[in-house]
Amino acid sequence: MNAAYTLPDERGHFGEYGGRYVPETLMQAILELEEEYRKAQADEGFQEELQALLKDYVGRETPLYFAENLTKYTGGAKIYLKREDLNHTGAHKINNSLGQALLALRMGKRKVVAETGAGQHGVATATACALLNLECIIFMGEEDIKRQQLNVFRMELLGAKVVGVNSGSATLKDAVNEALRYWVTNVEDTHYILGSVMGPHPFPMIVRDFQSVIGNETKEQYHEKEGKLPDAVVACIGGGSNSMGMFYPFIKDESVRMIGVEAAGLGTDTEKHAASLTKGTPGVLHGALMYLLQDEHGQIQEAHSISAGLDYPGVGPEHSYLKDSGRAEYESITDDEALDALKLLCKMEGIIPALESSHAVAYALKLAPQMNKEEGLVVCLSGRGDKDVETVRARLGGNGE
Amino acid sequence: MNRIEKVFQNLHQHNEKAFVPYIMAGDGSLETLAEKITFLEKAGATAIEIGIPFSDPVADGPVIQQAGIRALEAGTTLRSVLAKVAEIRPIVHIPLIFMTYMNPIMAYGIGNFISEASKSGIDGLILPDVPLEEEEMIAPIADRAGIEIIRLVTLTSPLERISAIASKGKGFLYAVTVNGITGARKEFKDELGRHLEKVKDVSPIPVLAGFGISEPEHVKEMNQHCDGVIVGSKIIELFQSGELAKIEELIASSKIEEIKL
């Protein structure tokens, strides 16, 4: 990997990964989206509008917080937390939703469809649509609706229509299927705000770019505090948007280890996990070639994770490429380890992290002691845990232990 | 000459329209596939589309999704369908066309799949999630094996793109008649007839209309503007409910010449 990293190529490929594996009905829409996005990138007015919203509406920049107690506890590298949990709506998802909602407006589309897993992307998209006066419909797996009741209500309060999806495992994968079907049917007046670095080109690129604000700020803030680059950045991966946003600005800084943390669920040696990069094989799903959890016949398998946001049997094409190229490392953390990390962060730092982000925290707890005290790592704390309190309470039996 | 080209040449000579039914392999067990295919051939089908089930069929509506789930639950795999088709091929004369998604083929191995499909007597292949931009990984291999890639054009494809897609094709062009997924519709957009005629104008190969067609009236209406129809969800439903006479009626509706005033 070097300074020449310019992926994706003009056909939307990251090496062999990515591409545009979509029904012909959608081709015109994604070609138009790409064209409009390139124009928006070059348009100072668009960039200023987005920056202003990120600052005054989302509350950026988010702090880079030195977790001193946690650092002392683990006794190794300095642990910093990039506080995406402090964004308006409680997670990094809003960075992308706002950007894409502005793109929808540019394209003259006043209707928006989106999928959601944990509900964070759904809430962020419903929020952006409320702000910009767009009609919003969100597809969400029935299983996730059960796990994330409050987020469903939040979306409805914000004026979105939430549609339950019963097919397949009734989780994020099936919500994406239904959102794509809806988009095929309503493509002429509707924009699809995809929530992660997946799907057909140009989505993996657009979502990465809008999320890169995470890594860009981190780089600057870390330099202010430590006068150098961090030695490692750690982020959780479902589809891979917060991690890609953290990694992308560091790709060319080869001294920075980039570590993505997948959900190992009950363990990667069981069938109940969501570790697509660790255990999967390349294939085509939801418009892109990427690592997938699939059986020998190419049927997609159900993913499992305690966190609804990581419960997806694929991972974005750029991560797939970064894995093969060796530039990024990918690890996995079980449900139990994530829960332990969540409890620890609550008690040590007074921060309740999302279950998704707890996976990154859990891996940082393993990594920090292996590094020396002069080194530093940054964990992307992608979201806050308020939405997960009920799940955690049920799992811990209500006594917090 | 590929069976698909031959059969269309024949239709053209007799001024007839094509009717291509779709069935899901393994729906109601793979053992019923031969029976369904021979029934459809006898009823007058021009060619048959055989669906291979995939867990996440984004281009399909509820009827084909459900048929796919039934087929997967019955243990249907690409491998078992290939073996079954090889067994059936000697007793069927019309073209057989696979319709599936890219992932089961990738998992099987693209080269292996094409070579075995060709040996099994498959004449064409429809991949709804592989647009022109991505077909390079499979189209040349299929072409060398004599399997025709049937390409789709839609209401949202600009005319230049339709023309580019049509010029690549050999068998027939699949003109999608709705914005949306497969499944019966009550009515179609008013401008559909004009759209189909524009497609026909730029296409050097026959144009068949598909998606949403479910009634003899639809068949007759579409046939005024193109070279035939593809019917999927309705055929699956009629097999499910055992209404075989209605399938015959639907296919027969494509044979009746419109009386022109």
Image: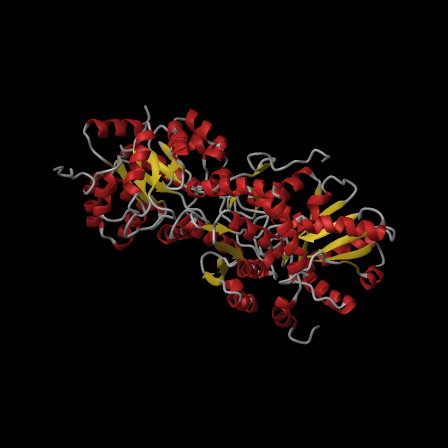
Give residue A214's position: percent from left, percent from top.
69, 51
Quarter holding residue A335 = bottom right
Q: Could you tell me if residue A322 is visible in this image?
A: yes
Q: Could you tell me if residue A313 is visible in this image?
A: no
Question: Which residue is pictured at 76% across the width and 69% down the height?
Answer: A347
* Residue A244 higher or lower than A252, as above or below: below
Number of labels in the image equals 0
Give residue A377's position: percent from left, percent from top.
79, 52
Give residue A221's position: percent from left, percent from top.
78, 52
Residue farthest toward the top in the current orientation of the protein: B1
Name the colouring of the figure. secondary structure
Residue farthest toward the front in the current orientation of the protein: A45
**Is residue A68 found left or right of A190 in the rendered image?**
right
Give residue A130's position: percent from left, percent from top.
53, 61
Question: Which residue is pictured at 34% across the width and 38% down the height?
Answer: B175
Quarter holding residue A250 = top right
Residue B254 or residue A109, whichever sits in front: A109
- Of the 4 image quadrants, the one containing the N terminus of chain B is top left
**Is residue B144 found left or right of A250 in the rendered image?**
left
Question: Which residue is pictured at 40% across the width and 32% down the height?
Answer: B160
Residue A87 or residue A247, whichever sits in front: A87
Residue farthest toward the bottom in the current orientation of the protein: A399
- Of the 4 image quadrants, the one containing the C terminus of chain B is top left
